[in-house]
Structure formats: C-alpha cells, structure tokens
Image (spheres, helix red, strand yellow):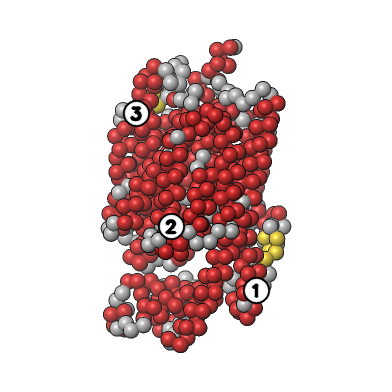
C-alpha cells in the first residue's frame, strides 16, 4: 500500500526526497491511464453503436457519463483529500479504472457502457485531485516545471494509445484492454510510492484558511458549475428559457442550493476570496473553451487536406498531441526565462494568432495554422495549475483542483453555448447568401433566444432526414434484402433513422426491426437513384456551409485567448509594480514566525 511521509518533514525532504522520482512516475502513469481511457472510449464509440444498437443520443450520454463525474470528483475530493490521504485516494482511482475497463470489455448493453463510463470519470477526477497537490508538495521549489512535465502524460497517453488503434485493425475489446497497461504500471508503482504530507498541512494552515483562499465568490462559481452540470445530467429545465440572464440559472432547487451553500461558506470563512484567484477561475473558462471546445472543428477542417496527403484525418489530433507532449517536457528553460505569467501570455498570443489564421487558411496551409494554435495551447492548463500552486499554496488541493474542475465544467456549461450561438448565426447568414431556397427549406422557422442574443438554427430534423436518406441509400443500393436485414450496421442505420424521422416526441416504446423498417419505407426514407442526386446536393451544400461557418467562427474564438492575454498582461504589470513575480513559500513563512 502507498505510504505517507512522516509529519513534520518538509515536502521534498527525508523519505519523500529519496522516493519522489517513483512518486512522480506513478502519478505520470496514472495520468497516462486517464488519457488512454479517454481516447479509447472515443475511438470505440462507433463500434459500440453498431454492436449494441446505440442511438446518437445514447452515444452522447455515454460520452457525457465519463465527463461530469470528473468535474464533481476533482472538486469534492479536494475538500477531504488531506483527511483521506493521497495513497487511499489513488487506490480508489485504481479500483475505478480497473473495474471500468472490466465493465466495458464485458459489456452486455447500454447500461454496462454507461456504468463503466461513470467509473472512468470518477477515476479521472480522483487521479487529478491527487497528483496535482502531491507533485506540488513533493517539488515545492519547482511547482510549475514539474506540474507541466507531469501533464505531458495527457498528450503522451493520447499518442501511445491513438497511433496503434488508428493504424492497427483490432476488436474494440482489445482496444479497451489496452487501458490495463498503464493502469497496472501505476498500480504497481503505488506499492513503492511514498506520498508527501500536503504543503498546507506541514505549514500549519488550517482548514478554514484553506477555504478562505477561493472564498465565497470562488465557492459561488464552482458550486454554480456543479449544479448546472447536475441539472443537465438529470435533464431538468433551467430556471427560465426566455433569453434573459436567468436562463443561465439551473432549476429552482439547484438555484436555492447554490445560494444556501454560498452563504454558509461565507459565514464560515468570512472571506470573499483572493481577487487574483477569482480572476483565474473566470479566465479558466475561456482557456478551457479555447483548448478543448474546438478540437473537433480543427479535425473537420483538416479532413480534406489530410486526405490529399493520403493520411487519415484523425492523425492531425495525434500530431498536435505530439507537439504538446514534447514541449511540455521542455518547460524548464521556458519557465525560468518567462515566469508562469509570461508563458501564459505568450501562449495566449500564439493561440489567438493560430485561430485567426485557421479562419483564413485553406488546403494544406491549415496544417501550419493548426501547428501555431497547437503550440499556443500547449502550456495553458499545466502552467495555470503551477501559477495557482505558487501563488495560493494556502488553498492546498482545493485552489489547485477547483480551477481544473471549473475549466472542465465551464467549457460544457458556458463555452459550448457561446460556440453554438456563433455557429448557428454564421450558418444562418452563409446559407442565406448561398441559396435562399435551401435556407427557407432547411432553417427552423421559429427564432430562438439565448443569453447571447436571438438566432435561427438549422431544422435538425431536416438535416437528419438528408443524412439518413443518403446513408440508407448507400447501404441498400444493389444489396440483397434478406442479407441486408441481418447486417448489424444496417440495423443501426434503421434504428437511428426511425428515431430521427418517424418516432414522435414522448414515444419510448421499443419497436421491432421489421416494424421500424416498414415505417421508414412508408415515410419515404428509401429513396431512388434520381432522388439521391437531389438529396446529395443538399448534403453537399450543408457540408460546405457548415465547414465555412466553422472556419469563420475560428476568427471569433480568437477573441477568447486575446482576452486571456490582456488579463495575463495586466497581472504581469501588477507584479512589476510590486517588484516582480515571486512564488509564495509557505515553509519560509513558517520559519519566519
């Protein structure tokens, strides 16, 4: 079992100093395992859809089941991790990782996949809740450097799992089993690893003082994110849906919970929070949206030019992960020269430039713009963690992990809404300019409202009708009807098309394959070759408009890292006025008392 260093010894001294390399490798392997599980679930999703007859909605639910437990567990574990201990928490993460993989490999239906994904999310959040404060405490003089190198484990996992899965033909069960490689490695290393006592605990900082660092405002932000995510998971309606600011509040019970918890937090801590930390929480939402929100868009833009090079489009993401992995290992001299805020400012500028040129580039030149963007976002996440560890050590695991949780939850709650609004308004304008008749036919008639403004969106039922008819035609053309009905891929297409085109709202009755197939035939979903040519033109128009819209939105997304750069520059100037940036050393403060 993982051991804990004796209390009273400063992090990095005694037994911890002798064994911290083992500790670091164990934490690195745990993050690699988390990354393996993330990318493998994504790459297995299509196979699961065919094998288990999943609808698109169910695919989204399974993916989401691996995300929301992460945001919850990383924050909640941070509140109690010093009581539970790093070692016991990592044993819990190991058990969740192993059980998740077993459930996925032996899955019988949707619920096995869903349960396995929840366990995977819990494992990921627990790993992050442990490794960040553990490494910050083990390397008190090199927090930013070692946290950044540690987080090279995320892109490393994407690369080492992604390349063989993309290039080697294997069953999805074998793909999932690959997760056991890093899981077993970090499990064995845990037997030898000695975790440090938290820097906060060693310095004698009380629990109340820890909570006072983020304060009531920090509590409000994080609890709001958690309640909004739970509101989504339980499919509850927001407080209002009228385009006002209250649309951003969850259902009444969760809104009351936010108010009560925040007031109780303030009554206990008597602190509103550190202004710089509150600023970093807000900036983290922009950061996460910039880093995570548009990865799939970049891949979509690169499909055609990558195809011209004879390469699968998915390799672009692997290429960008290689950039991140290599550069994160090289953080030492960069951080010494620029300090954390200088690194973040430079990255924000590069990301803004890369996104702007992605909105203008075409063909293979998109690869150059994507490279600049990839370099720009390389240090965002880990250096922000390093900055929090250096400036808010009194907050211990809480200030370190709450910023990660805020980013992960914020990109889904706020960032995705903003990106969606920009995308919808761009599609509306571009489709109207390209083809007025198609615009009138394919856009939803009713104008919608959001906190970002009024907009019109594509009629998703009509969009699904186009893609479903083409997919069914491609599968049915020239095929033997008897053999076709036994094809799992065709059965999945029929099931999805039935849900999109025939099933009415509120209808949850299970239908037989024959009944769904007949209903689609009656609805005119099985088109002729002449009809296919007409429908294909609509699909080509939509593909062009949506792709060009994503390219245009990239230019608007560039404003997010530009705002981040302005915030970082403001902090740099602030510290210059105070004599320069310095990390806070709790042990030095303790010795000076």
Is residue 390 toward the left or the right of residue 271 in the image?
left
Q: Quadrant of the N terminus?
A: top left
Mark sitting on residue 22: 3
Q: Provide the secondary structure element on which disc 1 rests.
A: helix
- Residue 304 visible, this angle: yes
Q: Position of residue 325 (x, y in %)?
A: 42, 41
- Which residue is at 29% across, 43% downward? 181
Crowd rating for badge 1 (residues with CA inside 10 Å; few <14, some 14–19, many 20+) = some
Q: Residue at x 45, y 35 (%)?
A: 330
Which residue, given by chain and number where applicable, does mark 1 sit on?
Answer: 432
Identified at 64% across, 50% down, the residue is: 559
**In the image, which is nearer the foreground, mark 1 or mark 3?**
1
* Vertical position of residue 285 compared to residue 243: above or below: above
Q: Earlier in the sequence, mark 2 or mark 3?
A: 3
Q: Residues within 10 Å of mark 2 (few under 14, many from 20)?
A: many
Which disc number belongs to residue 62? 2
Say few, some or many: other residues with alpha carbon within 10 Å of mark 3 (under 14 / 14 to 19 / 20 or more): some
> How much space separates mark 1 and mark 3, taking CA atoms?
60 Å
How far across and down, in percent of the image, does residue 314 sit? 41, 57
- Please tell me in which quadrant of the rendered image residue 402 appears: top right
Figure check: 391 above or below 432: above
Q: Nearer the viewer, residue 247 or 295?
A: 295
Q: Secondary structure under badge 3?
A: helix
- Image quarter in which the C terminus is found: top right
Left or right of 184, for residue 122: right
The disc, 1 or 2, on the residue closer to the chain's N-terminal end is 2
Give the CA separation, mark 1 to mark 2: 36 Å
Q: Between 323 and 255, which is closer to the camera in this rendering?
A: 323
Q: Measured from the top left, where is residue 67 in percent x and y?
A: 47, 50
Mark 1 or 3, nearer chain start: 3
Q: Residue at x 61, y 51 (%)?
A: 558
């Amino acid at each position: 079992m993982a051991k804990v260093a004796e209390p009273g010894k400063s992090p990095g001294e005694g037994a911890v100093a002798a064994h911290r390399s083992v500790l670091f490798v164990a934490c690195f392997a745990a993050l690699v395992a988390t990354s393996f599980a993330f990318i493998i679930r994504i790459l297995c999703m299509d196979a699961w859809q065919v094998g288990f007859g999943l609808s698109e909605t169910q695919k989204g639910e399974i993916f989401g089941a691996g995300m929301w437990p992460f945001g919850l567990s990383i924050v909640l574990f941070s509140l109690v991790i010093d009581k539970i201990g790093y070692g016991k928490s990592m044993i819990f993460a190991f058990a969740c990782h192993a059980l998740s993989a077993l459930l996925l490999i032996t899955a019988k239906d949707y619920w096995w996949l869903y349960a396995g994904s929840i366990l995977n999310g819990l494992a990921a959040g627990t790993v992050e809740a442990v490794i960040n404060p553990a490494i910050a405490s083990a390397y008190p003089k090199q927090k930013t450097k070692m946290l950044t190198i540690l987080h090279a484990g995320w892109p490393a996992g994407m690369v080492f799992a992604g390349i063989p899965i993309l290039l080697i033909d294997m069953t999805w069960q074998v793909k999932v089993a690959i997760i056991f490689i890093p899981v077993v490695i970090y499990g064995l290393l845990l037997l030898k690893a000695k975790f440090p006592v938290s820097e906060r605990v060693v310095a004698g900082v009380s629990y109340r003082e820890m909570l006072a660092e983020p304060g009531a405002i920090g509590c409000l932000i994080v609890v709001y994110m958690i309640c909004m995510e739970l509101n989504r998971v339980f499919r509850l309606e927001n407080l209002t849906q009228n385009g006002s600011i209250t649309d951003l509040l969850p259902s009444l019970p969760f809104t009351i919970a936010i108010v009560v918890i925040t007031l109780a937090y303030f009554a206990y801590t008597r602190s509103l929070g550190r202004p710089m930390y509150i600023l970093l929480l807000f900036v983290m939402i922009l950061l996460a949206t910039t880093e995570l929100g548009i990865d799939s868009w970049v891949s979509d833009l690169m499909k055609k030019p990558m195809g011209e090079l004879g390469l699968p489009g998915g390799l672009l993401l692997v290429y960008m992960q290689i950039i991140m992995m290599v550069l994160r290992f090289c953080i030492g001299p960069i951080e010494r020269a620029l300090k954390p805020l200088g690194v973040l400012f430079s990255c924000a500028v590069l990301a803004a430039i890369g996104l702007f040129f992605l909105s203008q580039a075409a063909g293979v030149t998109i690869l150059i713009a994507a490279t600049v963007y990839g370099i720009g976002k390389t240090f965002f996440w880990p250096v922000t963690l390093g900055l929090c560890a250096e400036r808010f050590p009194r907050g211990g695991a809480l200030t370190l992990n709450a910023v990660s949780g805020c980013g992960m939850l914020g990109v889904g709650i706020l960032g995705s809404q903003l990106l969606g609004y920009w995308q919808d308004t761009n599609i509306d304008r571009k489709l109207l300019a390209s083809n007025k008749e198609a615009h009138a036919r394919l856009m939803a008639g009713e104008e919608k409202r959001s906190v970002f403004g009024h907009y019109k969106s594509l009629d998703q039922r009509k969009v699904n009708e186009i893609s479903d008819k083409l997919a069914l035609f491609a599968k049915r053309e020239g095929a033997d009807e008897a053999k076709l009905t036994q094809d799992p891929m065709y059965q999945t297409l029929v099931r999805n098309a039935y849900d999109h085109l025939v099933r009415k709202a509120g209808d949850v009755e299970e239908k037989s394959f024959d009944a769904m197939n007949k209903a689609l035939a009656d609805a005119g979903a099985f088109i002729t070759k002449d009809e296919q040519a007409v429908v294909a033109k609509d699909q080509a128009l939509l593909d062009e408009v949506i792709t060009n819209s994503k390219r245009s939105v990239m230019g608007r997304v560039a404003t997010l890292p530009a705002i981040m750069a302005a915030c970082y520059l403001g902090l740099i100037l602030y510290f210059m006025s105070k004599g320069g940036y310095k990390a806070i050393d709790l042990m030095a403060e303790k010795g000076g008392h």
